[in-house]
Every structure is written in C-alpha cells, then in structure tokens.
Amino acid sequence: MTDSLPHRLPLVPRLLRFLGRPTMQRLGTEEEQRELRVYRLLCLLAAVLMLAFGVAYQWSDTTAQDPLLYRVLLAGMALSIIGSSYGHAKVRQHFGFLVLMLLYVTTIHFIHVAALNNFAPQYTVGLLFAVPGLGVGYSASLRRITPLIWYFIFTVVLASMACYTLPNPETAPAVFIGSLSSISLAVFMVANAWIDAQKNYRASQERYQAVVEQASDGIYLLDAETLRFLDANPAYLEMSGYRREELLGLTVQDLVVDELETAVDAGLSDSEEHAHLTGWRLRRKDGSEIFVDFRIDHIRYEGREVLSVVVHDITQRRQFEERLIAAKERAEEIARFKTTLLTNMNHEIRTPLSGILGCTAVLKEEVPTEQRELVELIEESGKRLFGNLDAVLELATLDANSKQLALTTLDVEREVEMAVAPWRQQAEAAGLSFLIEKPETPFHIQFDASILRRILNHLLDNALKFTRRGHIAVRLAAVGDDFRLRVDDTGVGISDDFLPYVFEEFKQESEGASRHYEGNGLGLAITRRLVQLHGGEIRVESWKGRGTTFIATFPDAICTPEAQAPLASPLQQILLSAQG
C-alpha cells in the first residue's frame, strides 16, 4: 500500500515533487539545493504563464495579434532548461544566469504582445499580473536585492517606451505605468524584507551551527518516528567512534546498552517536550562502553518533528564516584577492624595490666626500702600505659558513636568542685595556685555528669602538664541559656602555627624522641568529641610563653531544678502514690 501511494497523488503535486528532487546524488549544500528547486519552479511558472495567457487571449479575442509560435518556443525553452538540469552539471552551475535570461526574454515578449494589441485592457492586466509574479518567483532564490531592482527598472522603462510610442493606446499610459511602478515597488519591498529575513536566518543558522560544531557535549538529531540519526556534531562523532556517514545509517537503539534501550524509548516517547536520562551506558563503535547523561527535546526541524539530544560524557565522574565508594567501603572496613582491635586490646591488655598494677601495689609494701623506687617506677609506668589505653579506647567509643548521653540536672558549682578536687591537690603540690571562678547567682545545667568530669579531666591534665609556675583557673558562666566552661593556665602556650592542629588526633607541638612533654596527643581530640557530643563547641586562645585558654560553650544547657529534675524511680512512684 505504501509503494502505490505516490502513483495516486494528483498530477500537480507529483510534478512539484519531481521538480523539487535535486538529482540522484546530493548536490552541494542545502542552500544550493533550495536555489535549484526555486529556479526549476520559476521556469515551470514562466512556461505555464506563457501558454495559459496565450490560450486565454485567443479564446477571449480571436482578432488578437498573439503569435502562438513564440509562446510555444519560449515555453519549450523553459522546460528544456528544467530537463537539462537533471543530467548536465554545467546547466546546474549556470542555472541562475539562464533563468535570468529567460526572465528578461519572457518579459520582453509580454510587453511586445501588449504593444501589438495597442495595450488593450486584457493585455495590460495580464502584464500587471505576469511581471510581479515573475519578479516574486525570481526573488525567492536571491541573496541580494540588486538583480530584482534592475529587472523592475528594465521592465518599467521598456513598458513606458512601448506605451508612449503608440499613437492611441487603449489604456492610459500614465495609469498603466503608475500601476506597474506601484506593483513593482510593493513587490520590491516584500522581496527586500524576505531577503533580509533570509539573510538573518542564515546568519543565525551559521551561529547556531558554529556553537553546535564547537560544543564539548555531543549533540545529534533523531527522526521522531524511526529514531534514526539525521545529523550529529563532531563531539558526538568522537564520543561514539563513528563517522558521520556510518552514523546516519543507524538508529539510537544500535548504540544503547541493555536496559538503557528501554529507558531511552520511554524518554523519547514521553508526551512532554523535555526528557532527562542520567547515568546510562553508551556503546561505542569499538565495543567499549561509556557512561552518559541524555537531554532530549522535541523540536521542529525543516518542517517536521525531530528529537534534539544532548549527550554529556560522565565516564570520568562515574569512575571517580566508584573510587570514592570503594575508598569509603575500605575506610569503613578499616574502622571496623580498628574497633575490633581496640575491643580485643581492652580485654587482652587491660586484664594483665590490672594484675601487674595490683601486684606492684603489694610488692611496694613488701620489698626493702632501697628497692621500693624500682617498684614505684614500674607502678608509674603501668599507670601511664593504663591511661594511654583508656584514651585510645575512649576515642574508639566516640568514633563508633556508641556513647549515649545520660542527662540529669546538675548543680554545676558542686559538680565542678568535686571533679577538680584531685587536680587542685596536684596543682598545689606543684607550687601552682588553683582558682575556681563562680557566678554570683548559682545555676543548674541539664548535663551528663560523666562527660562533664571527663572534659574537666582532659583540660586540667593538659594545663598541669604544660604549666610550671603561675596558676590554673576554672571559670563558670551563664550566658543567657548557654553554659560556658573556661580553663586558663599560665603555661608555655601554643604557637600560632600549631593552633589549627591542636584538636587533631595524635598531634603534638613537640614530636619525636626529643620532645619535652609526655602524652599521646589524644586528650584534646577526645575533649572536642565530648563537647560536640553534648551539642557544644570548643575553641582555644593561646600566647606563646604566656599561657592558654580553652573555652567550651554548651547552648541551651541552663535549666531550673524543678523543670528539669530527673524522674522518680519506680519505687519512689509507688511510695508517692501510696501517700496520695
């Protein structure tokens, strides 16, 4: 049924389709093909007008002087130019010149016939129709308006000479020439606007083509029905590995991979004007695959519905994401291994170490005085090792986010007094003054008591370690609903270069075997984790050789004992209900 359809078309559409076909091979650019089609249609128009006007004149006025032979010869010339353009490249090459000559010859013939018939009204009207019609047809193929101007000037001048040389023309010369000039001017203005529009359109097309050709993303056009490639830019040709001629013989399904085919079909058949597909695979000509994103738009192109597809190569991004995922999984595996290792250390090291310290305490009482110093050295080293183990295990617990808050209402002054009592003794034994600065109005906080003690322990341990003279101060303050804890010392201070790293794990300002202070570099890192666990933040201010200040702020920690008191135990609730 499809094959027989063209034969059932009316004669005129079939003829126009035949005239519009360039040749069996593609002839130059699309612009050149369009000009060739216009020239052929213009020749056909000249032939039809020539014969039609001749028949009409002979039928309406049998006495008219209208040599039919001339009309047949001119129509035959026009048709022969059309026919020869299909087989001779030189005719196609000089088609524009041949059409121009035919246009002038046809116009001269029309004016001559009108003059032979004394510019009778029917010939005058025919001339007023024929000349603008030929001018409009000729202008459709022009890129400059100048040839049309010269054609109208020639026509008006020749018609004026022919009309005014007659002694008694049937049509008033002034009316005829004025009408012809006015119609020519109107055609000129329309043609000029058309040529300017075409010029702007070509410039826009050239700019668009330049953008498409230079785009880093692949861009191609698909037939909306068959999904066959219509065109593609160099970026997509390089991306797919195909040459343009090879690609135009394929459909989009030939390049997509497994499940992408269904996804693309779904996106392309979507009723919406836009579709976006991301993270799919595209098969190249050599069989390799790349990851791409598709942006699909429904557009009109050369009078038909097509699909404009922009393809962005995300292969490198996808590979980077896969490496990140692998690195994340590896990091999680290492973290699990670290947690397992530390858990085993807690059992395998802490248990024998506790036995060593217990035996050391007994030995210290049993050995002679001269050997007690060695036992005390063993005890001190064991306690130091125990402290390091505790710090590592505490950090591992915080890293695993397994620490849960046990919030209670605390009398902050009383809690801090009890927590710093051992550190006060150590400071005074070392010749330092120890201060606790309290606000004038006592207050309570909603806090985890164990975390408060651990924060103070780490900060005061750090202060005692680096302070040889002066004082250590713990300052408490209520700023609105925020609780602020501040620990000052007059120790060695921290250099400006090391301040950004002070809260990092295993970081110490003095490192290596020559360092002057003991420690594992975990105390302040643990302190920051503990502060953050309670929703607070901590910062440090320090001056080299003058001391250091740590300030921890906990938002919305201030509370009243009545509003935030802990719930009564089940036994207390039973007793209260019995009393009630």
Image (spheres, grey):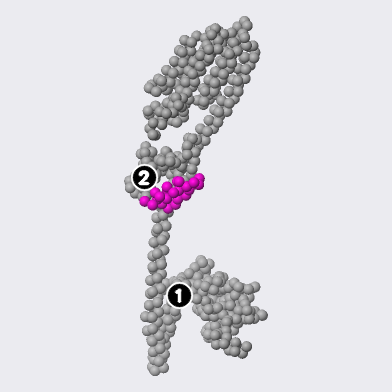
Q: Secondary structure at mark 2?
A: helix
Residue 473 within the segment the image draws in magenta: no
The x and y percentages for residue 153 are 57, 17
Amino acid marked by disc 2: Asp
The x and y percentages for residue 293 are 44, 50
Question: Closer to the observer: label 2 or label 1?
Answer: 2
Q: How many marks?
A: 2
Above or below: residue 257 compared with residue 128:
below
Instruction: State the residue position of label 2.
Output: 254
Identified at 43% across, 44% down, the residue is: 218
Q: In the rendered image, is residue 48 in sight?
A: yes
Above or below: residue 187 compared with residue 307:
above
- Looking at marks 2 and 1 on the same chain, the residue that comes earlier in the sequence is marked by 2
The x and y percentages for residue 437 are 62, 80
Instruction: State the residue position of label 1.
Output: 397
Q: Which portion, as a residue range, is magenta?
A: 258-280
The x and y percentages for residue 80 are 42, 17
Q: Residue furthest top?
A: 167
Q: Where is residue 8, by image quadrant?
A: top left
Identified at 58% across, 76% down, the residue is: 485
Q: Where is residue 561, by image quadrant?
A: bottom right
Amino acid marked by disc 1: Thr
Identified at 63% across, 75% down, the residue is: 478
